[in-house]
Image (spheres, rainbow, N blue to C red):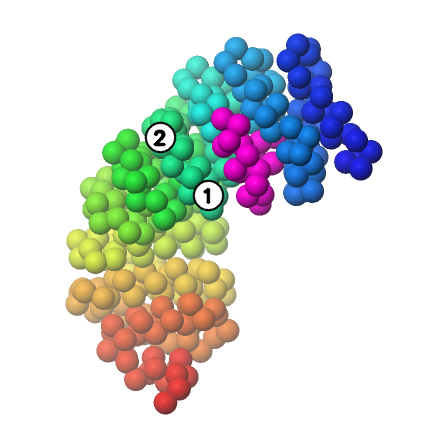
Amino acid sequence: MRECGGVAALVALLAPGGSAAEQEQAVGALRDLCVDNVQNGNSVRECGGIAALVALLAPGGPAAVQEAAAMALRYLCFNNAQNRDNIRVCGGIAALIGLLAPGRSAAVQGAAAGALWNLCSYNAQNCDIVRECGGIAALVALLAPGETAAVREQAAGALTNLCVCNTQNMDSIRECGGVAALVGLLAPGASAAVHEWAAAALRNLCISSTQNRVCVRWCGGIAPLVELLAPGSPAVVLEYAAAALWNACIDNVENMDSVRECGGVAALVGLLAPARPAAVHLAAAGALAALTSKSRQSRDAVGAYGGVAALERVLACASSASAHERAAAALCNLGRVQQAVNDLDLPD
């Protein structure tokens, strides 16, 4: 279809003055063409389609057209850095944030939040623009209990990307009440996808922020993160929850104590079982290394729950090099320095 001029023809149907029905059909076709197809996404950009789609997000347009246009923009910027930049240049970020406003349908809000999620992937400028346009407060508002699970998932995913290597956004999310809202998403009964992205966002928020680590504990986040480590949770939830605890415990003895008191040590040791994926091993070993770095009580607890043997098994199994490194760090904290060095097979 691309080679036959189909993309250009569809973009032409988005021009002002067209019927809403035609525009909705054309946008839907462009959206479908861009799913997992970078070449089609490039063609849409080259034909002026991004500017045309952004124009359809203007206030007053039909909700169905706006939803489809936001979804098309979401797929257009997936794994496509040029399209992410072009959407920003065309004013798409502010337009998408406008669709997050109260009163919009859940479908429109979810599509806009999903587009912002992809727009903020590995794009520091877009992350800054979202903050400057008031997008963080708008996304945090979508985490509220009254929103649909799909909307909350998309908003949490967008916040996850917004705080990657961006301390201003980390601070802004906390100041907008985002830490407490994300902790609220960890409650039992939420979908696995909501749990996954809430834990991922908390993981990223705690990477380099002492204040956010404290805030997670003050908001009651440690206990529900530990609860997500239950054996029946999906592997990706286990990974992100353990990683959130890992980052929350860095240089924070109070959080180390809280994780231990909530039963986190036993749960983390359990994640080192041979059947678990390497990513889960890495997150669990990292959390145990952080827990044992400055807390004698946590070191004692790891030993009491069989953590030494479990960590040594990680070193001996075909896990990732990063998991081996974190397991060795935990063993060093536990006084098993020589064993850890020997198992890593370091050069003399």
Q: Earlier in the sequence, mark 1 or mark 2?
A: 1
Give the numbered dot on residue 209.
none
Q: Amino acid at mark 2?
A: Glu
Residue at image location 38% in from the left, 27% down from the top: 133
Give the labeled residue for mark 2. Answer: 132
* Residue 277 left/right relative to 331: right
Pick the residue in front: 205 or 311: 205
> How many labels sit on residues?
2
Residue 183 can be seen in this image: no
* Residue 30 left/right relative to 339: right
Q: Amino acid at mark 1?
A: Asn
Pick the residue in front: 185 or 341: 341
Q: Position of residue 338 (x, y in %)?
A: 30, 84
Q: Quadrant of residue 265?
A: bottom left
Q: Is 156 rendered above or below residue 205? A: above
Q: Quadrant of residue 35?
A: top right
Residue at image location 36% in from the left, 32% down from the top: 131
* Residue 158 left/right relative to 294: right
Give the numbered dot on residue 123.
1
Magenta span: 72-91
- Quadrant location, the N terminus: top right
Farthest bottom residue in view: 348
Q: In the image, is residue 73 part of the stretch drawn in magenta?
A: yes
Label 1 element class: loop
- Quadrant location, the C terminus: bottom left
Residue at image location 57% in from the left, 41% down from the top: 82
